[in-house]
Amino acid sequence: MRDAMLTPVPLQRDGALDALKWLALLSMVLDHLRYVGLELDWLYVPGRLAFPWFCLAMAANLWRVGAARRPGQWSYLGWLLAFSGLSEIPYRLFVPEPDTLNVLPTLALGLLVARGWQRRSGLDLVLGVVALG
């Protein structure tokens, strides 16, 4: 018999996870206020928390879904890549002399690595290893 703590919970709204997402979003918006002409350099510190909070939210969502194969399993990655391309335009406009991509491609790579680690077979594993490399 499987341990109840190790089995994924049914897919329902999780208030704590929603709060984490909103907190990460607020932190990101505060960080980006520095780029629109406001002299708020002190917002850099809370803004650095957005990325790890978004990573934690992605990991929690992957855990909730578990190893179940669903028809729309790649839709989250597709939307992440679409917004990555779309957000690159304002990133190039507002960041002086950008020499890297914005943060969304890094989140997409992290998603591929996490899925490869979670499922450890087939295309998920191959994409996870390639993303890790």
Image: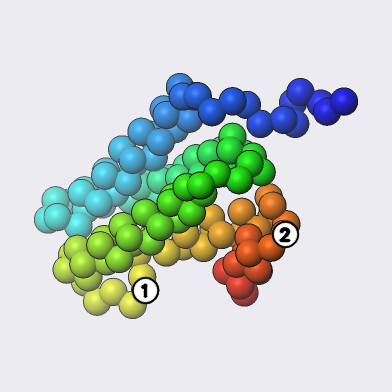
Residue 104 image position (x, y, % from top left) = 39, 59
The amino acid type found where label 2 is placed reads: Ser
Residue 44 image position (x, y, % from top left) = 33, 50
- Rendered view: 92 above or below 61: below
**Spatial separation of the CA atoms under disc 1 and disc 2:** 32 Å
Residue at 59% over, 34% down? 64
Q: Nearer the viewer, mark 1 or mark 2?
A: 2
Q: Is residue 56 visible?
A: no
How would you rate the neighbour count of disc 2 (Cα within 10 Å): few for under 14, some for 14-19, many for 20 or more? few
- Residue lying farthest left? 37
How would you rate the neighbour count of disc 1 (Cα within 10 Å): few for under 14, some for 14-19, many for 20 or more? few
- Rendered view: 9 above or below 102: above
The quarter of the picture where residue 29 lies is: top left
The quarter of the picture where residue 122 lies is: bottom right
Residue at 76% over, 23% down? 4
- What residue sits right under mark 2 in the picture? 121
| Residue 100 disc label | 1
Point out the image quarter for the N terminus.
Answer: top right
Count of labels shown?
A: 2
27 to the left or right of 69: left
Residue at 68% over, 50% down? 118
**Residue in the foreground of this view, choosing between 29 and 87:** 87
Residue 31 image position (x, y, % from top left) = 29, 49
93 to the left or right of 42: left
120 to the left or right of 23: right
The amino acid type found where label 1 is placed reads: Thr
Q: Tag 2, which secondary structure?
A: loop
Residue at 48% over, 30% down? 17
The quarter of the picture where residue 2 lies is: top right
**Residue in the foreground of this view, choosing between 56 and 8:** 8
**Residue in the foreground of this view, choosing between 38 and 7:** 7
Residue 132 image position (x, y, % from top left) = 61, 68
